[in-house]
Amino acid sequence: MENETQNSEQSPEQTQNIEQQPNVVTYDEFNRLDLRIAQIVEAERVAKSKKLIKLQINLGDVLGERQIVAGIGKQYTPEELIGRKIVVVANLKPAKLMDLESKGMLLAASNEEHTFLTLIGVDPLTPIGVKVS
């Protein structure tokens, strides 16, 4: 246990490096995000867009189904997305993209140039609707 405590402590230099990063958030700010596991039940390309895909996702019994629109169409086809489990920001203010309402945002990893993008992986056994913390 003592080693765990020692390893988790940060040196003053490490703390200063974190504080100098752009857009540093507090724990309370992070905790306001409602990150949930969702399953994609429908997916289709958005007309007149090369990268937007309209997704119907299931967030479980409490939050139900909803639509999100994601810019992942260059990396994924709608067919390979159906059934996939993803991480979603469930309490994001709805937005309109190409006249489609998006009620959430999926999480993906990408490089700064956006030439690489991948969905955040989820263990297939993880139940939908559970909170990510």
Image (cartoon, grey):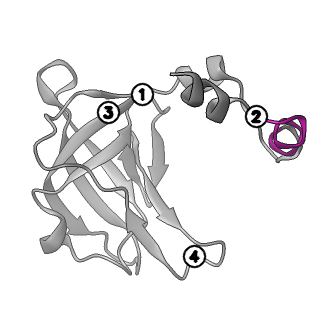
Whether residue 12 is in magenta: the answer is: yes
Cα gap from disc 3 to disc 2, whole angstroms: 29 Å
Magenta: predominant secondary structure element? Answer: helix
Cα gap from disc 1 to disc 4, whole angstroms: 26 Å
Give me the residue at 82% from left, 47% from top. Answer: 22
* Sequence-first tag of 3 and 4: 3
Dot 4 alpha-carbon crowd within 10 angstroms: few under 14, some 14 to 19, many 20 or more: few
Span of residues in magenta: 10-18
Cα gap from disc 2 to disc 4, whole angstroms: 31 Å
Using the image, determine if residue 103 lies above or below residue 70: above
* Sequence-first tag of 1 and 2: 2
Give me the residue at 76% from left, 37% from top. Answer: 24
Amino acid carrying label 2: it is: Gln
- The circle drawn on residue 114 is 4
Dot 2 alpha-carbon crowd within 10 angstroms: few under 14, some 14 to 19, many 20 or more: few
* Sequence-first tag of 1 and 4: 4
**Residue in front for this viewpoint, 48 or 88:** 88
Cα gap from disc 3 to disc 4, whole angstroms: 24 Å
Whether residue 130 is in magenta: the answer is: no
At mark 3, the secondary structure is strand
Tell me, yes or no, if residue 75 can be seen here: yes
73 relative position to 20: left or right: left
At mark 4, the secondary structure is loop
- The circle drawn on residue 10 is 2
- The circle drawn on residue 133 is 1
Give me the residue at 42% from left, 26% from top. Answer: 34
Q: Percent from the top left, x then y, of residue 90?
A: 37, 32
Cα gap from disc 1 to disc 2, whole angstroms: 21 Å
* Sequence-first tag of 3 and 1: 3
- The circle drawn on residue 15 is none
Q: Percent from the top left, x then y, of residue 132?
A: 36, 31
